Image (cartoon, rainbow, N blue to C red):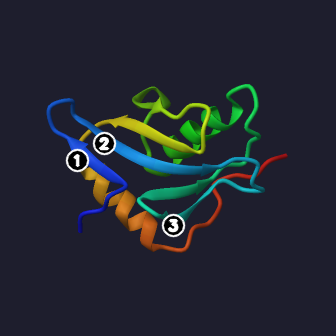
């Protein structure tokens, strides 16, 4: 299945995601598709880069990759973000499986 919200770049060996982030949520979780982006609720406010840090943490835990392998390349101050994840093309299949399942929150705000 080919999705518009992610693609694998074989020359750079990274997965490129288009995300629609919703900061300030009670829990961090993948919600589903939002147009051509994957919607992700983030349990952090959109101040002082806290939502971006929480997004990277959430993706790291969810995909089982190190935080240092994830970078917000575009949209650091907007809801629409382009995120790059270093690694193999197997991450794309893992993300598509997560998109189809009902999500349980990974962690909540305290």
> What residue is at 69 percent from the left and 52 percent from the top?
107
> What residue is at 74 percent from the left and 42 percent from the top?
44
> Contact (CB < 8 A) between labels 2 and 1?
yes
**Relative to the observer, which residue lies in front, 30 or 77?**
77
Q: Which residue is mark 2?
A: 15
**Which element type, helix, strand or loop, lies under badge 2?**
strand
The label shown at residue 32 is 3
The x, y position of residue 75, in whole percent, is 52, 34
Q: Nearer the viewer, mark 1 or mark 3?
A: 3
**Which element type, helix, strand or loop, lies under badge 3?**
strand
Cα separation between marks 3 and 2: 18 Å
Mark 3 surroundings within 10 Å by alpha-carbon count, few (fewer than 14), some (14 through 19), many (20 or more): some
Cα separation between marks 2 and 1: 7 Å
**Which element type, helix, strand or loop, lies under badge 1?**
loop
N-terminal label among 3 and 2: 2
Q: Nearer the viewer, mark 2 or mark 1?
A: 2
Q: How many marks?
A: 3
Residue 83 vertical placement versus 2 (above, below): above
């Amino acid at each position: 299945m080919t999705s518009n919200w992610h693609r694998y770049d074989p020359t750079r060996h990274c997965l490129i995601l288009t995300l629609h982030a919703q900061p300030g949520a009670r829990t961090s979780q993948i919600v589903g598709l939002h147009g051509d982006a994957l919607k992700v609720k983030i349990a952090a406010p959109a101040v002082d880069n806290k939502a971006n840090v929480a997004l990277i943490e959430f993706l790291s835990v969810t995909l089982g990759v190190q935080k240092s392998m994830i970078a917000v390349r575009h949209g650091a101050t907007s809801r629409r973000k382009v995120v790059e994840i270093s690694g193999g093309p197997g991450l794309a299949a893992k993300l598509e499986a997560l998109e189809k399942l009902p999500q349980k929150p990974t962690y909540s705000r305290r």
